[in-house]
Image (spheres, helix red, strand yellow):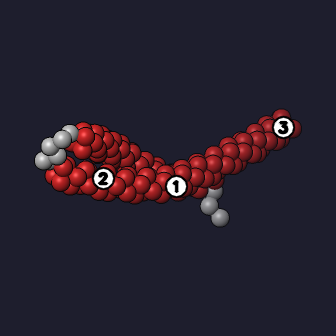
Amino acid sequence: MPSPKQKTQKIQPLIKIRKLQLDQETMRLNQIKLKREEAAQALMQSQRTYIEGVDKLNRERQSPERKMLPALEQGVDFAKAQWYQRLMALRAVEEEERRQFMMVAEAQKKMKMLEHLDERYGEQHTKHMKIQEQKQLDEFAITMNRRKDWE
């Protein structure tokens, strides 16, 4: 059976690996957050474009000439379709972000589990060392007592 010190030495590389995994998952989550922010900005831009197009279309409908009406209607339809596409893209990125957040939480859980195990092994090692030290002190005291008896 391995000693607590050997257990601690074996678990250290695993902790480093879990830390790297956690860092990678966190980095990926941060990248997704940036992607979500970009998608949200694109969605807002599409919304502004759509609203401006609707305003222009309404003004054209109220004017007596109405020469640009078909072109403006097509432009508004395009802006609405683009707005919807960007909304769906944002929702997809948000779903990806939720999944990645779960991955980070799982990586943190695994990391904490190994850290807790390492602490427990460390406590066992300390306890083992205290027991060994006490045994040595006892043996030393017995040896000293025997020497006094011989003298």
Residue beneath the point at 48% across and 54% down: 98
State the separation of the CA atoms marked 3 and 2.
96 Å
Looking at the image, is mark 3 or mark 2 nearer the viewer?
Answer: 2
For the residue pair 36 and 117, the one nearer the viewer reads as 36
**Picture coordinates of residue 117, whole percent (x, y):** 63, 52
User: Which residue is most to the front?
Assistant: 64
Could you say which disc has been placed on residue 102 in the image? 1
Going from N to C along the chain, the mark reached first, 3 or 1, is 1
- Which residue, given by chain and number where applicable, does mark 2 sit on? 80
Left or right of 119 on screen, residue 28: left
Mark 3 surroundings within 10 Å by alpha-carbon count, few (fewer than 14), some (14 through 19), many (20 or more): few
- Disc 2 secondary structure class: helix
Q: Are marks 3 and 2 in contact (CB under 8 Å)?
A: no
State the separation of the CA atoms marked 3 and 1.
64 Å
Amino acid bearing label 3: Asn
- Which residue, given by chain and number where applicable, does mark 3 sit on? 145
Residue beneath the point at 25% across and 40% down: 62
Q: Is residue 140 visible?
A: no
Residue beneath the point at 31% across and 41% down: 51
Amino acid bearing label 2: Lys
Q: Is residue 105 visible?
A: yes
